[in-house]
Amino acid sequence: MVKKQGKIASIFIASAILTACSTGKADWPNLSDPVPDALERQRAIETSGTANIIPGQKPSAPERPSLIGDSDAVPTADPTPESVEEATTLFQNIKKALREETLSYRETKAKLADSDNPESKQDAWFAAQLALTRLSRTASRLETIVALKMPDLAAAAISESDIIDRFVVGERQFLMDAEPEAGRHQ
């Protein structure tokens, strides 16, 4: 009995689907219609206005969006030092840049704490995120020193990198906790 009801139900469902498809406003082909020519089925492929990319050629980097206020140019990769003196000079320059970026981050973090209205707090929060990202990017420049076969400088760079990495992780957590309500993702 159950098998018979299952067959009846499936026949009923199939006929309902067939009826629904045939009564629609779509222009369905009939079996008696001739098969369309294969050339008629080929369509021209329309592309968006993007430039053709040549395989093996690297696309150009997108332009950096302009920021309100003072913003530095995108830093370029540091040249690989050839001598200990060049490596020491580069390391000192990176440490100086790290101090400047840390100071810049702390100033923006202070603005975040001082802001009262939600809009200025949101702006200060984004500025702090940007400053922390710049600090992290400057810290990644230490990898050039670490990659050298100069153990003393590499050890100092690793130590400096570890300190900055711990600082950045802690500050990212602070900024996530301090994110203004208007900017939280629902």
Image (cartoon, helix red, strand yellow):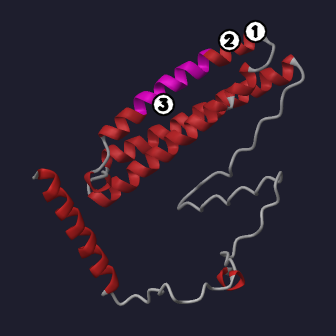
Q: CA distance from mark 3 to mark 2?
A: 20 Å
Decide: marks 3, 2 in contact (CB < 8 A)?
A: no
- Report the front residue among 22 and 2: 2
What span is in magenta? Answer: 159-171
Query: What residue sits right under mark 2 in the picture?
Result: 155
- Report the front residue among 56 and 70: 56
Query: What residue sits right under mark 3 in the picture?
Result: 168
Q: Amino acid at mark 2?
A: Ala
Q: Amino acid at mark 1?
A: Pro
25 lies above or below 147? below
Report which quarter residue 137 is drawn in.
Answer: top right
Decide: marks 1, 2 in contact (CB < 8 A)?
A: yes
Q: Looking at the image, which residue is at 27% across and 69% down? A: 14
Of label 3 and label 2, which has the lower sequence position? 2
Furthest-right residue in view? 82
Of label 3 and label 1, which has the lower sequence position? 1
Determine whether the residue tagged by mark 1 lies in a helix, strand or loop: helix
Q: Amino acid at mark 3?
A: Val
Mark 2 closeness class: few <14, some 14–19, many ≥20 residues within 10 Å: few
Query: What residue sits right under mark 1 in the picture?
Result: 151
Count up the numbered dots: 3
- Tell me: 84 left or right of 182: right
